[in-house]
């Protein structure tokens, strides 16, 4: 953006160009450079040329629809937007319609039915993963309805959304922002929106008995992460610290859950969950939708996942047993708590999810497994942990029959599990956990999940490789 500064010397006013500059650790910032020119006509020519160059960049958004959750995280959403983001959008000549949400699902329902989406080049959400999930549900559902696609059919191919989504982190975990940008910083995210970055992302659909339940773009977690979330929801007043409290409490309860996980392994792909390479900006694997490619490819990624010791039913692997946690990570799920994430080698846009099964083990071993999420050690290199890269999976809890059982569960066993959850010393284990679906609780234990490759796009470029020397970073880019 070029702005003339008045008045310094009224006959020869300087002009300022604002540009994006890389700072440390994936942070971007905005800087200014001021030009002086003694000739008015030449100066005008400079301004005109820069403006023309910027207008020619069609990937940059000009009109955005912004939703702010005023209650996310530390309840700073409005303040973060007004002070850090709105001035940058204004500087980049981006016009905005801003909606501060008044209740849960306000943004989702507005996007689904009312919003005049043709007016916008993208949607921005200011909040955490729950708020992002609302935007995804609104946009994906609307796109399917407008294209006559039935969301209730688990096998249906969904139509990708055309509008990009920007995330301004103002929530508690902000995992989706961290795992796609490399940092939770509102200014960095706003600058990625302004320069018009685009990153495709996979979305999982979750069904129960041929009924659509929800979409998930980061974590689907049963057992440990489901229980942490269920407990933490009752402690929202604690803010982001609720997860530390509920995490510790859930760790002490050490509940396990019995059931069968069946999964369709992604055998025809590049990459495995045990790769040393990471999904980064311009990722080779995501550029090919994860499909096996005959050209040169990273050698280590060519091996198919090892499922040879599994039971097989029609090409599906089946694992039965007692689990402390069943996690499906469609992306790394990196966040400040775990900078490498639940599945460090997962890809943002390869059409697969990493299914992590943590079998019943001692508290000590489970603690070792959890602590490895925060160190360089491999959290999958433990006898009670297995990980598979899959396209679809199903979970059926033991003793699960049909929906009438759900009623029984809701009336009786929920009460039982509630009592047990509130008494960590109690040795009995509840029969069912719940699913943590991007930070929202799912009421069903038995679910069927399918991955939809590159269903949505974000205003980011994926995590950039850190330059070997910070001062050799790429040249700046004008706003
Ligand atoms: C004893 C050391 C324990 C270290 C455990 C580290 C493992 C942390 C991995 C966390 C993965 C989080 C995946 C993201 C989940 C979010 O979608 C969800 C909702 O976020 P938000 O809407 O912003 O609140 N957050 C959670 O479910 C919190 C999980 C916390 C687990 C301790
Ligand atoms: N105005 C509102 N009042 C109450 N809840 C809201 C509002 N707007 C959004 N929500 C809901 O708040 C929940 C948490 O939002 P999120 O932004 O993810 O914050 P956090 O990261 O702290 O969980 C989501 O389930 C979202 O649907
Ligand atoms: Ca993926």
Image: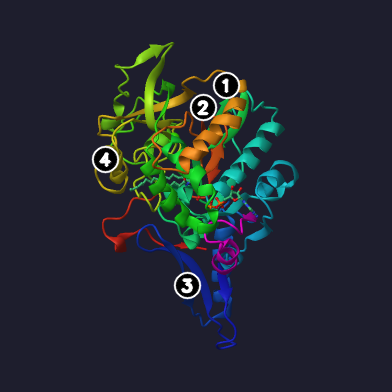
Measure the alpha-carbon separation of dots 1 and 4: 41 Å
Q: Which mark is residue 364?
A: 4
Residue 359, compared with residue 184, is above or below; it is above
Q: Which residue is mark 2?
A: 450
**Residue 32: numbered disc:** 3
Q: For mark 1, what is the residue? A: 155
- Front-most of residues 467 and 445: 445
Label 4 sits on a secondary structure element that is helix
Front label number (3 vs 4)? 4
Q: Nearer the viewer, mark 1 or mark 4?
A: 4
Residue for point 46% across, 51% down: 173
Please tell me whether residue 382 belongs to the stretch shown in magenta.
no
Q: Which region shows up in magenta?
A: 64-84
**Do labels 1 and 3 touch, CB within 8 Å?**
no
Q: Which callout, 2 or 4, points to the residue nearer the camera?
A: 4
- Residue at 64%, 54% in the rendered image: 67
Image quarter of residue 6: bottom right
């Amino acid at each position: 953006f070029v702005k003339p500064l008045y008045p310094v010397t009224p006959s020869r006013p300087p002009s300022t160009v604002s540009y994006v500059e890389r700072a440390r650790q994936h942070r971007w910032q905005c800087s200014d450079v001021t030009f002086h020119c003694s000739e008015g006509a030449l100066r005008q020519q400079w301004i005109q040329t820069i403006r023309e160059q910027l207008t020619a960049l069609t990937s940059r958004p000009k009109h955005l629809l912004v939703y702010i959750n005023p209650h996310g995280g530390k309840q700073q959403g409005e303040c973060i937007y007004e002070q850090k983001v709105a001035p940058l959008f204004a500087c980049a000549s981006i016009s905005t319609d801003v909606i501060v949400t008044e209740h849960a699902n306000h943004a989702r329902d507005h996007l689904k039915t009312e919003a005049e989406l043709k007016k916008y080049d993208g949607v921005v959400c200011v909040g955490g993963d729950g708020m992002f999930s609302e935007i995804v549900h609104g946009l994906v559902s609307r796109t399917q309805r407008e294209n006559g696609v039935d969301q209730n059919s688990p096998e249906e191919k969904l139509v990708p959304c055309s509008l990009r989504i920007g995330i301004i982190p103002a929530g508690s975990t902000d995992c989706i922002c961290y795992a796609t940008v490399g940092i939770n910083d509102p200014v960095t995210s706003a600058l990625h929106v302004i320069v018009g970055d685009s990153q495709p992302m996979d979305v999982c659909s979750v069904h129960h008995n041929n009924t659509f339940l929800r979409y998930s773009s980061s974590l689907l977690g049963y057992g440990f992460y489901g229980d942490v979330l269920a407990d933490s929801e009752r402690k929202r007043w604690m803010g982001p610290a609720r997860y530390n409290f509920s995490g510790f409490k859930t760790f002490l309860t050490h509940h396990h859950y019995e059931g069968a996980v069946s999964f369709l392994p992604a055998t025809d792909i590049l990459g495995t969950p045990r790769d040393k390479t990471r999904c980064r900006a311009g990722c080779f694997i995501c550029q090919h939708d994860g499909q096996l490619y005959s050209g040169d490819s990273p050698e280590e990624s060519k091996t198919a996942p090892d499922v040879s010791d599994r039971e097989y039913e029609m090409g599906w692997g089946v694992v039965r047993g007692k689990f402390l946690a069943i996690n499906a990570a469609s992306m790394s799920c990196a966040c400040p708590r775990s900078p490498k994430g639940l599945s460090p080698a997962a890809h943002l846009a390869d059409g697969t999810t990493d299914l992590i099964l943590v079998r019943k083990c001692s508290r000590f071993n489970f603690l070792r497994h959890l602590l490895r999420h925060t160190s360089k050690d491999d959290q999958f290199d433990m006898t009670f942990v297995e990980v598979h890269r899959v396209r679809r999976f199903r979970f059926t809890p033991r003793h699960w029959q049909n929906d009438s059982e759900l009623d029984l569960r809701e009336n009786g066993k929920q009460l039982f599990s509630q009592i047990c959850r509130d008494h960590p010393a109690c040795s009995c284990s509840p029969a069912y956990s719940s699913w943590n679906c991007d930070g929202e609780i799912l009421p069903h234990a038995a679910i069927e999940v399918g991955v939809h490759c590159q269903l949505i796009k974000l205003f980011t470029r994926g995590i950039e490789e850190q330059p070997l020397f910070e001062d050799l970073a790429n040249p700046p880019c004008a706003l």
